[in-house]
Image (cartoon, rainbow, N blue to C red):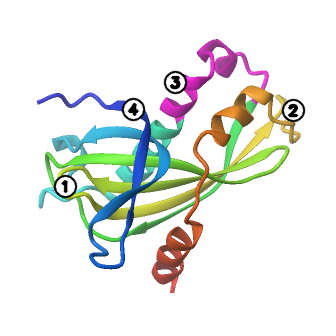
Amino acid sequence: MAFFPTFSTEKKLKVSNETNPKKYVNKLSSFIYHHTVSIGDTNITRSVYFTRYLEWLGYAREAMLINTVNPSEIVSGEIILVTKNTAIAYLKEFDLYDKVELHVTTGKLTASTVQLCFRYIHAEKQELYAVAKQLILMTSKQGKPKKAPLKYVNVVLKYPEKNMSEIDSHLKKRML
């Protein structure tokens, strides 16, 4: 059993259908990051630490960029990616050795920001376990907002989010 995360692209995101909302049907394109829950991800009861969801979100975001933009451009410092805010709604708990598909899509895009959307899917059950949104700000080395290079824009345009209401609905329920 491999514990090293992998990723794939252009897979269809599975969106809940009306006859069985727990199961997902192919509808949307997304970048997919794969992860197997390891012992280090869990507590004594074998459920995943809530902070791991945030960690996996970061890994998925970086994998999406590295897969589509030259890594030397990312580390050059020409553009710095700053996380402005993140929100996660935990719907179910992953357990030790569960296989996770983290689907990444993009929401709002401005000249210097991009909103990333995340769905945490149990790979074997094809059920939604969590959702998240993250706002990324692109800045110069001096911290001033900077217009995103066309390469970055093209990355995010490959995976547009088409069901933001589903994510927002889960996030609102968890915030009350």
Sequence order check: which comes first, mark 4 or mark 1?
A: 4
Residue 36 in the magenta stretch? The answer is: no
Of the numbered discs in the image, which one, if any, rests on residue 8? 4
Contact? badges 4 and 2 (CB < 8 Å): no
Give the spatial CA distance, label 1 vs label 3: 32 Å
Q: Position of residue 3 (x, y in %)?
A: 21, 31
- The secondary structure that dominates the magenta segment is helix
- Considering the numbered disc 1 on the image, is that residue within a helix, a strand or a loop? loop
- Considering the numbered disc 3 on the image, is that residue within a helix, a strand or a loop? helix
User: Alpha-carbon neighbours of circle 1 within 10 Å: few (<14), some, or many (≥20)?
Assistant: few
Sequence order check: which comes first, mark 4 or mark 2?
A: 4
Give the spatial CA distance, label 4 vs label 1: 29 Å
Give the spatial CA distance, label 4 vs label 2: 35 Å
Q: Does residue 85 appear to the left or right of 167 in the view shown?
A: right
158 is higher (above) or lower (below) than 6:
below
- Considering the numbered disc 2 on the image, is that residue within a helix, a strand or a loop? loop
Please tell me which residue is depicted at 66% across the width and 22% down the height of the picture.
74
What residue is disc 2 on? 142
What is the three-letter code of the residue carrying label 3? Asn
Residue 140: which quarter of the image? Answer: top right
What residue is disc 1 on? 43
Contact? badges 2 and 3 (CB < 8 Å): no
Sequence order check: which comes first, mark 2 or mark 1?
A: 1
- Considering the numbered disc 4 on the image, is that residue within a helix, a strand or a loop? strand
Of the numbered discs in the image, which one, if any, rests on residue 67? 3
Q: Residue furthest top?
A: 72
Label 4 vs label 2, nearer the camera = 4
Which quadrant of the rendered structure holds the N terminus? top left
